[in-house]
Image (spheres, grey):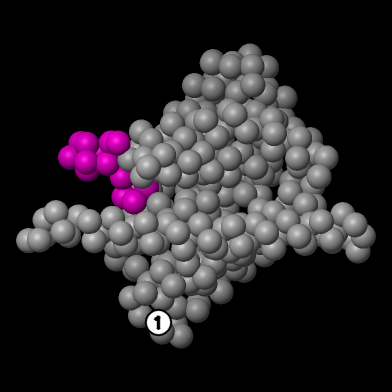
């Protein structure tokens, strides 16, 4: 059952990565696997071997989430933008109490409000950035296109693992979201190779930096993550109209928040039961 839950969490992270404005890192924090994921992304064989099953299950789930739900989510955002955005906002709101508890777990001091405030400020700035609707045109692979796509993959990957910042949104801003999405849909391998290479460098490098911050500046980093996740609501907010669509959107927000909150509670209880079971099996642990 634990493996199935991990696979589903991977699917949700994958879904989060393909929606402009939604961060896969945010979903990972909401799902309670962010720390473990960041710590597992490494080139050290001993650490990699220890976390191999975790990474495989999460990775497979992400792949399924990206390929299976991209069409569905595209349809929902195109035809029901407000209810869909409000539903995602609800999922984030429902997870905030658990994230706040984790941030304050090892102690609280007023100075930790500074990184949280800066993080919310960054998200507020991003919320007011309007992506360029004119996408770049990329035909056959050339040397200049190779480096352009490599750079796009790198910055998108770094953005993807930082909670609150959407890699898809960053690609939209620089005009490369549509060309890369088209390359994925058409399985244009020559164009995808530099993107994948850039993403690999971005994920490994970004994860190393975040892992360092989590170990050396734990509380400040957690409060910054809390700010990024809370601030992502500003990016997702699509506006509001007082009509039936607005009422449905509010209902979606409340229901999604309840579901998200209940899932965090159930996940916490499941983890506690597992810890007790392990302790009983190994009393000396």
- Count of numbered circles in the view: 1
Q: In the shown orientation, is residue 200 left or right of residue 183?
A: left
Badge 1 local density, few (<14 within 10 Å), some, or many (20+)?
few
Residue 36 appearing in the image: yes
At 67% from the left edge and 23% from the top edge, which residue is drawn? Answer: 182
Q: Position of residue 24 (x, y in %)?
A: 53, 47
At 61% from the left edge and 62% from the top edge, which residue is drawn? Answer: 258
- For mark 1, give the secondary structure: loop
Where, quadrant-wise, is the C terminus in this rendering?
bottom left
Q: In the shown orientation, is residue 73 left or right of residue 215?
A: right
* 190 drawn magenta: no
Name the main secondary structure of what is drawn in magenta: helix
Residues in magenta? 36-53
Figure quadrant of residue 241: bottom right
Q: Position of residue 167 (x, y in %)?
A: 58, 44
At 57% from the left edge and 33% from the top edge, which residue is drawn? Answer: 66
In the displayed orientation, state which residue is furthest to the left: 284
At 40% from the left edge and 82% from the top edge, which residue is drawn? Answer: 108
């Amino acid at each position: 059952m634990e493996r199935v839950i991990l696979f589903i969490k991977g699917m949700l992270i994958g879904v989060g990565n393909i929606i402009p404005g939604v961060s896969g890192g945010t979903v990972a924090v909401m799902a309670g696997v962010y720390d473990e994921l960041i710590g597992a992304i490494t080139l050290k064989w001993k650490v990699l071997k220890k976390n191999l099953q975790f990474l495989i299950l999460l990775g497979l789930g992400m792949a399924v989430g990206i390929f299976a739900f991209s069409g569905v989510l595209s349809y929902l955002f195109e035809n029901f933008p407000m209810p869909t955005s409000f539903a995602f906002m609800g999922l984030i709101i429902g997870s905030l109490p658990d994230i706040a508890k984790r941030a304050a777990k090892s102690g609280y001091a007023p100075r930790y409000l500074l990184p949280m405030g800066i993080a919310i400020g960054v998200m507020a700035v991003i919320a007011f950035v309007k992506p360029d609707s004119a996408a770049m045109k990329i035909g056959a692979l050339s040397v200049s296109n190779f480096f352009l796509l490599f750079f796009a993959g790198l910055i998108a990957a770094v953005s993807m693992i930082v909670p609150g910042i959407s890699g898809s949104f960053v690609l939209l801003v620089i005009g490369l979201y549509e060309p890369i999405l088209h390359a994925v849909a058409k399985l244009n391998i020559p164009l995808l190779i530099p993107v994948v290479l850039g993403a690999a460098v971005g994920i490994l490098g970004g994860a190393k930096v975040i892992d360092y911050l989590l170990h050396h500046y734990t509380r400040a980093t957690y409060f910054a993550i809390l700010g990024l996740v809370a601030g992502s609501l500003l990016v997702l907010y699509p506006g509001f109209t007082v009509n039936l669509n607005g009422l449905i959107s509010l209902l979606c927000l409340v229901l999604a928040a309840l579901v998200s909150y209940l899932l965090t509670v159930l996940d916490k209880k499941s983890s506690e039961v597992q810890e007790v079971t392990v302790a009983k099996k190994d009393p000396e642990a």
